[in-house]
Protein backbone atom coordinates (compact mmCIF):
# COMPACT_ATOMS: atom_id res chain seq x y z
CA UNK A 1 0.00 0.00 0.00
CA UNK A 2 2.97 2.32 0.57
CA UNK A 3 3.49 2.56 -3.20
CA UNK A 4 0.15 4.32 -3.64
CA UNK A 5 0.68 8.04 -4.24
CA UNK A 6 -1.70 10.81 -3.24
CA UNK A 7 -2.45 14.18 -4.78
CA UNK A 8 -5.10 16.87 -4.81
CA UNK A 9 -6.74 18.14 -7.97
CA UNK A 10 -8.64 21.40 -8.28
CA UNK A 11 -12.01 20.35 -9.62
CA UNK A 12 -14.83 22.83 -10.10
CA UNK A 13 -13.84 24.91 -7.09
CA UNK A 14 -12.98 22.01 -4.77
CA UNK A 15 -9.78 20.18 -3.95
CA UNK A 16 -10.47 16.50 -4.59
CA UNK A 17 -8.19 13.82 -3.25
CA UNK A 18 -6.92 11.21 -5.71
CA UNK A 19 -4.94 8.05 -4.93
CA UNK A 20 -2.84 6.67 -7.76
CA UNK A 21 -0.42 3.85 -8.56
CA UNK A 22 1.09 2.47 -11.75
CA UNK A 23 2.26 4.00 -15.00
CA UNK A 24 0.76 1.83 -17.72
CA UNK A 25 -0.89 3.31 -20.83
CA UNK A 26 -4.28 1.81 -19.96
CA UNK A 27 -6.08 3.50 -17.06
CA UNK A 28 -8.56 2.12 -14.55
CA UNK A 29 -10.62 4.62 -12.57
CA UNK A 30 -12.15 3.24 -9.36
CA UNK A 31 -15.31 4.82 -7.90
CA UNK A 32 -16.22 3.93 -4.32
CA UNK A 33 -19.56 3.41 -2.57
CA UNK A 34 -20.79 4.03 0.98
CA UNK A 35 -19.46 3.82 3.65
CA UNK A 36 -16.31 3.61 1.59
CA UNK A 37 -13.47 5.79 0.35
CA UNK A 38 -10.58 5.35 -2.09
CA UNK A 39 -9.05 2.88 0.40
CA UNK A 40 -11.73 0.28 -0.33
CA UNK A 41 -9.92 -0.29 -3.66
CA UNK A 42 -6.49 -0.84 -2.08
CA UNK A 43 -6.17 -4.47 -3.20
CA UNK A 44 -7.42 -3.81 -6.72
CA UNK A 45 -5.17 -0.79 -7.24
CA UNK A 46 -1.98 -2.63 -6.32
CA UNK A 47 -2.94 -5.66 -8.43
CA UNK A 48 -3.73 -3.46 -11.43
CA UNK A 49 -0.40 -1.62 -11.15
CA UNK A 50 1.49 -4.90 -10.83
CA UNK A 51 -0.19 -6.04 -14.05
CA UNK A 52 0.90 -2.96 -15.99
CA UNK A 53 -2.08 -0.64 -15.54
CA UNK A 54 -2.42 2.84 -14.12
CA UNK A 55 -4.93 2.77 -11.26
CA UNK A 56 -6.65 5.90 -9.96
CA UNK A 57 -9.16 6.17 -7.12
CA UNK A 58 -10.63 9.52 -6.06
CA UNK A 59 -12.57 10.29 -2.93
CA UNK A 60 -15.89 11.71 -4.07
CA UNK A 61 -16.57 15.33 -3.08
CA UNK A 62 -17.37 15.45 0.63
CA UNK A 63 -15.87 12.00 1.24
CA UNK A 64 -12.53 11.09 2.81
CA UNK A 65 -9.81 13.61 2.06
CA UNK A 66 -11.75 15.51 -0.62
CA UNK A 67 -13.27 18.88 0.16
CA UNK A 68 -17.00 18.99 0.57
CA UNK A 69 -19.33 21.32 -1.29
CA UNK A 70 -20.25 24.55 0.47
CA UNK A 71 -23.91 23.53 0.31
CA UNK A 72 -23.87 19.76 0.80
CA UNK A 73 -27.66 19.63 0.81
CA UNK A 74 -27.53 20.58 -2.88
CA UNK A 75 -24.96 17.95 -3.89
CA UNK A 76 -26.14 15.48 -6.52
CA UNK A 77 -25.08 12.59 -8.73
CA UNK A 78 -24.57 15.01 -11.60
CA UNK A 79 -21.73 16.55 -9.61
CA UNK A 80 -19.97 13.19 -9.47
CA UNK A 81 -20.27 12.72 -13.23
CA UNK A 82 -18.90 16.21 -13.87
CA UNK A 83 -16.12 15.67 -11.31
CA UNK A 84 -15.10 12.45 -13.04
CA UNK A 85 -14.79 14.24 -16.36
CA UNK A 86 -12.80 17.06 -14.75
CA UNK A 87 -10.40 14.60 -13.09
CA UNK A 88 -9.73 12.82 -16.39
CA UNK A 89 -9.20 16.12 -18.19
CA UNK A 90 -6.90 17.38 -15.46
CA UNK A 91 -4.79 14.24 -15.71
CA UNK A 92 -4.88 14.29 -19.54
CA UNK A 93 -6.51 10.85 -19.67
CA UNK A 94 -8.51 10.30 -22.84
CA UNK A 95 -10.13 6.95 -22.04
CA UNK A 96 -10.63 4.70 -19.02
CA UNK A 97 -12.12 1.54 -17.68
CA UNK A 98 -14.52 2.44 -14.87
CA UNK A 99 -14.74 0.12 -11.85
CA UNK A 100 -17.47 1.05 -9.39
CA UNK A 101 -19.01 -0.30 -6.23
CA UNK A 102 -22.41 0.28 -4.63
CA UNK A 103 -23.80 3.74 -5.46
CA UNK A 104 -20.63 4.45 -7.45
CA UNK A 105 -22.28 2.37 -10.16
CA UNK A 106 -24.68 5.20 -10.93
CA UNK A 107 -22.11 7.89 -11.81
CA UNK A 108 -20.07 5.23 -13.62
CA UNK A 109 -22.93 4.27 -15.90
CA UNK A 110 -24.09 7.86 -16.31
CA UNK A 111 -20.57 8.78 -17.37
CA UNK A 112 -20.64 5.94 -19.92
CA UNK A 113 -23.94 7.30 -21.27
CA UNK A 114 -22.87 10.94 -21.48
CA UNK A 115 -19.21 10.41 -22.43
CA UNK A 116 -19.17 7.16 -24.37
CA UNK A 117 -15.97 8.12 -26.18
CA UNK A 118 -14.08 8.29 -22.87
CA UNK A 119 -15.06 4.81 -21.63
CA UNK A 120 -13.57 1.45 -22.63
CA UNK A 121 -15.76 -0.57 -20.28
CA UNK A 122 -17.62 -0.54 -16.98
CA UNK A 123 -17.35 -3.00 -14.10
CA UNK A 124 -19.69 -2.71 -11.13
CA UNK A 125 -20.05 -4.59 -7.87
CA UNK A 126 -23.15 -4.91 -5.73
CA UNK A 127 -25.39 -2.78 -7.95
CA UNK A 128 -26.54 -3.43 -11.54
CA UNK A 129 -27.37 -0.71 -14.02
CA UNK A 130 -30.94 0.49 -13.72
CA UNK A 131 -32.02 3.49 -15.83
CA UNK A 132 -32.39 6.38 -13.36
CA UNK A 133 -35.94 7.00 -12.22
CA UNK A 134 -37.61 8.08 -8.97
CA UNK A 135 -37.31 5.26 -6.43
CA UNK A 136 -40.38 3.34 -5.27
CA UNK A 137 -38.96 1.75 -2.12
CA UNK A 138 -41.81 3.12 -0.02
CA UNK A 139 -44.29 1.03 -2.04
CA UNK A 140 -42.59 -2.28 -1.29
CA UNK A 141 -40.55 -1.90 1.88
CA UNK A 142 -41.49 -0.80 5.41
CA UNK A 143 -40.77 2.60 6.93
CA UNK A 144 -37.79 1.15 8.79
CA UNK A 145 -35.91 0.34 5.57
CA UNK A 146 -32.51 1.94 5.96
CA UNK A 147 -32.64 4.04 2.78
CA UNK A 148 -36.02 5.50 3.74
CA UNK A 149 -34.65 6.31 7.19
CA UNK A 150 -31.55 7.97 5.80
CA UNK A 151 -33.57 10.00 3.32
CA UNK A 152 -35.43 11.68 6.16
CA UNK A 153 -33.63 14.99 6.93
CA UNK A 154 -32.10 14.94 10.39
CA UNK A 155 -32.95 11.33 11.20
CA UNK A 156 -29.61 9.77 10.23
CA UNK A 157 -27.69 12.79 11.50
CA UNK A 158 -29.18 12.25 14.95
CA UNK A 159 -28.64 8.49 14.77
CA UNK A 160 -25.01 8.76 13.65
CA UNK A 161 -24.39 11.64 16.05
CA UNK A 162 -24.74 9.30 19.04
CA UNK A 163 -21.48 7.61 18.00
CA UNK A 164 -18.03 8.51 16.76
CA UNK A 165 -17.35 8.10 13.03
CA UNK A 166 -15.40 4.88 13.54
CA UNK A 167 -18.36 3.23 15.27
CA UNK A 168 -20.76 4.36 12.55
CA UNK A 169 -18.56 2.84 9.84
CA UNK A 170 -18.11 -0.31 11.91
CA UNK A 171 -21.85 -0.76 12.33
CA UNK A 172 -22.61 -0.15 8.66
CA UNK A 173 -19.92 -2.59 7.54
CA UNK A 174 -21.42 -5.25 9.79
CA UNK A 175 -24.97 -4.51 8.59
CA UNK A 176 -24.08 -4.39 4.90
CA UNK A 177 -22.07 -7.63 5.19
CA UNK A 178 -25.22 -9.53 6.08
CA UNK A 179 -27.57 -11.16 3.59
CA UNK A 180 -30.68 -9.41 4.92
CA UNK A 181 -31.79 -5.85 4.17
CA UNK A 182 -31.29 -3.56 7.19
CA UNK A 183 -34.79 -2.73 8.44
CA UNK A 184 -35.59 -1.33 11.87
CA UNK A 185 -38.65 -1.47 14.03
CA UNK A 186 -40.69 1.71 14.50
CA UNK A 187 -38.93 2.73 17.72
CA UNK A 188 -35.42 1.90 16.50
CA UNK A 189 -32.74 3.63 14.47
CA UNK A 190 -30.34 1.92 12.09
CA UNK A 191 -27.39 2.03 14.48
CA UNK A 192 -29.51 0.10 17.00
CA UNK A 193 -29.45 -2.95 14.72
CA UNK A 194 -25.84 -3.77 15.62
CA UNK A 195 -24.89 -5.09 19.03
CA UNK A 196 -21.52 -3.65 20.16
CA UNK A 197 -20.29 -7.18 20.89
CA UNK A 198 -20.67 -8.33 17.28
CA UNK A 199 -17.22 -8.64 15.67
CA UNK A 200 -16.17 -7.14 12.37
CA UNK A 201 -16.14 -9.42 9.33
CA UNK A 202 -12.89 -11.40 9.42
CA UNK A 203 -11.67 -9.80 6.17
CA UNK A 204 -12.02 -6.25 7.56
CA UNK A 205 -9.42 -5.50 10.21
CA UNK A 206 -9.32 -3.05 13.08
CA UNK A 207 -6.55 -1.26 11.17
CA UNK A 208 -8.83 -0.93 8.15
CA UNK A 209 -11.60 0.40 10.38
CA UNK A 210 -9.25 2.95 11.96
CA UNK A 211 -8.36 4.33 8.52
CA UNK A 212 -12.01 4.61 7.50
CA UNK A 213 -12.96 6.09 10.86
CA UNK A 214 -10.26 8.77 10.72
CA UNK A 215 -11.30 9.87 7.25
CA UNK A 216 -15.02 9.99 8.03
CA UNK A 217 -14.17 11.86 11.22
CA UNK A 218 -12.65 14.47 8.93
CA UNK A 219 -15.38 14.55 6.29
CA UNK A 220 -18.44 13.78 8.39
CA UNK A 221 -21.52 12.20 6.83
CA UNK A 222 -23.45 15.23 5.62
CA UNK A 223 -22.50 14.97 1.94
CA UNK A 224 -22.56 11.16 2.10
CA UNK A 225 -26.19 11.21 3.20
CA UNK A 226 -27.10 13.65 0.44
CA UNK A 227 -25.34 11.60 -2.25
CA UNK A 228 -26.48 8.94 -2.64
CA UNK A 229 -29.48 8.65 -0.34
CA UNK A 230 -31.21 11.98 -0.82
CA UNK A 231 -30.46 12.30 -4.53
CA UNK A 232 -32.09 9.21 -5.99
CA UNK A 233 -34.93 11.21 -7.55
CA UNK A 234 -32.52 13.35 -9.58
CA UNK A 235 -33.46 13.79 -13.25
CA UNK A 236 -30.84 13.48 -16.01
CA UNK A 237 -32.81 14.05 -19.24
CA UNK A 238 -31.50 10.83 -20.75
CA UNK A 239 -32.80 10.28 -24.28
CA UNK A 240 -31.27 6.82 -24.76
CA UNK A 241 -30.78 4.79 -21.55
CA UNK A 242 -28.96 1.91 -23.25
CA UNK A 243 -25.29 1.54 -22.26
CA UNK A 244 -23.16 0.89 -25.33
CA UNK A 245 -19.86 -0.19 -23.78
CA UNK A 246 -18.76 -3.64 -22.57
CA UNK A 247 -19.73 -4.24 -18.96
CA UNK A 248 -19.26 -6.71 -16.13
CA UNK A 249 -21.43 -7.07 -13.03
CA UNK A 250 -19.96 -8.90 -10.04
CA UNK A 251 -22.48 -9.84 -7.36
CA UNK A 252 -21.97 -11.71 -4.12
CA UNK A 253 -24.52 -14.50 -3.74
CA UNK A 254 -25.16 -13.29 -0.18
CA UNK A 255 -25.32 -9.59 -1.02
CA UNK A 256 -28.34 -8.07 0.73
CA UNK A 257 -29.01 -5.94 -2.35
CA UNK A 258 -30.35 -9.07 -4.05
CA UNK A 259 -33.25 -8.91 -1.57
CA UNK A 260 -34.39 -5.52 -2.92
CA UNK A 261 -37.82 -6.02 -4.55
CA UNK A 262 -37.33 -7.44 -8.06
CA UNK A 263 -33.56 -6.99 -8.06
CA UNK A 264 -32.47 -10.63 -8.25
CA UNK A 265 -35.01 -11.42 -10.96
CA UNK A 266 -33.96 -8.31 -12.91
CA UNK A 267 -30.41 -9.64 -13.02
CA UNK A 268 -30.97 -13.38 -13.40
CA UNK A 269 -33.79 -13.14 -15.95
CA UNK A 270 -31.53 -11.14 -18.25
CA UNK A 271 -33.78 -8.07 -18.25
CA UNK A 272 -30.78 -5.97 -17.23
CA UNK A 273 -29.28 -6.78 -20.65
CA UNK A 274 -32.06 -4.82 -22.31
CA UNK A 275 -30.21 -1.76 -21.02
CA UNK A 276 -26.65 -3.16 -21.05
CA UNK A 277 -26.55 -5.51 -24.05
CA UNK A 278 -22.84 -6.32 -23.77
CA UNK A 279 -23.02 -7.37 -20.12
CA UNK A 280 -21.40 -10.31 -18.39
CA UNK A 281 -22.73 -11.27 -14.94
CA UNK A 282 -20.75 -13.25 -12.38
CA UNK A 283 -22.03 -14.39 -8.98
CA UNK A 284 -19.50 -15.15 -6.26
CA UNK A 285 -20.55 -17.88 -3.80
CA UNK A 286 -20.60 -16.63 -0.19
CA UNK A 287 -19.88 -13.13 -1.45
CA UNK A 288 -21.32 -10.18 0.48
CA UNK A 289 -21.82 -6.55 -0.52
CA UNK A 290 -18.06 -6.01 -0.12
CA UNK A 291 -16.69 -8.65 -2.48
CA UNK A 292 -13.66 -6.57 -3.47
CA UNK A 293 -12.45 -6.59 0.13
CA UNK A 294 -13.79 -10.03 1.05
CA UNK A 295 -12.34 -11.90 -1.94
CA UNK A 296 -9.71 -9.52 -3.36
CA UNK A 297 -7.73 -12.11 -5.32
CA UNK A 298 -10.79 -13.43 -7.13
CA UNK A 299 -12.17 -9.97 -7.82
CA UNK A 300 -8.77 -8.77 -9.06
CA UNK A 301 -8.66 -11.71 -11.46
CA UNK A 302 -12.15 -10.96 -12.77
CA UNK A 303 -11.43 -7.27 -13.25
CA UNK A 304 -8.11 -7.73 -14.99
CA UNK A 305 -9.34 -10.55 -17.23
CA UNK A 306 -12.31 -8.45 -18.35
CA UNK A 307 -10.11 -5.42 -19.06
CA UNK A 308 -7.54 -7.42 -21.03
CA UNK A 309 -10.36 -8.88 -23.12
CA UNK A 310 -11.60 -5.37 -23.98
CA UNK A 311 -8.38 -3.40 -23.99
CA UNK A 312 -8.99 -1.95 -27.44
CA UNK A 313 -12.65 -1.00 -26.90
Image (cartoon, rainbow, N blue to C red):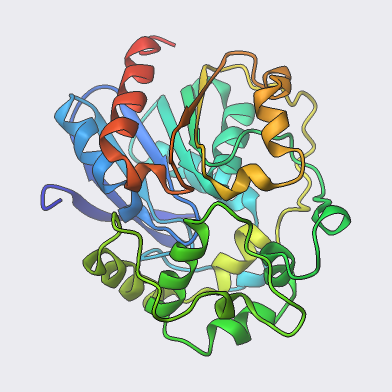
Compared with 35, 20 (above or below) is: above
Task: Name the foreground residue: 305 vs 87.
Answer: 305
Task: Name the foreground residue: 229 vs 272.
Answer: 272
Image quadrant of residue 107? top right
Please give the name of the residue rendered at 32% of the width and 18% of the height, measured from the top-left corner.
Answer: 305
Please give the name of the residue rendered at 72% of the width and 53% of the height, measured from the top-left corner.
Answer: 232
Compared with 280, 255 (above or below) is: below
Q: Position of residue 139 (x, y in %)?
A: 88, 55
Compared with 68, 227 (above or below) is: above
Please give the name of the residue rendered at 73% of the width and 77% of the height, measured from the top-left corner.
Answer: 153
Q: Position of residue 25 (x, y in %)?
A: 24, 22
Q: Position of residue 37 (x, y in %)?
A: 39, 57
* Left or right position of 43 against 217: left
Image quadrant of residue 203? bottom left
The answer to whether residue 165 of the structure is visible from this angle is yes
Task: Name the foreground residue: 174 vs 149.
Answer: 174
Viewport quadrant of the C terminus: top left
Q: Position of residue 18 (x, y in %)?
A: 32, 52
Residue that protrudes farthest toward the bottom in the picture? 162
Compared with 63, 192 (above or below) is: below
The answer to whether residue 62 of the structure is visible from this angle is no
Residue that protrudes farthest toward the right in the picture? 139
Residue that protrudes farthest toward the left in the picture? 2
Image label count: 0
Amino acid sequence: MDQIQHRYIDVRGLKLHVAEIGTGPSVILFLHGFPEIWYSWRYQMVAAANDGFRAIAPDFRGYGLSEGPRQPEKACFGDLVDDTLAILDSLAISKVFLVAKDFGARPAYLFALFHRERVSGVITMGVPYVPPSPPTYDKYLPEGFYILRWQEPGRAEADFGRHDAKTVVRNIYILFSRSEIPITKENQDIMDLVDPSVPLPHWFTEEDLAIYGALYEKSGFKTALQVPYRSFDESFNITDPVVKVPALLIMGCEDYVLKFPGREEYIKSGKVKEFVPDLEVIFLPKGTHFVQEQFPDKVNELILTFIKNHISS
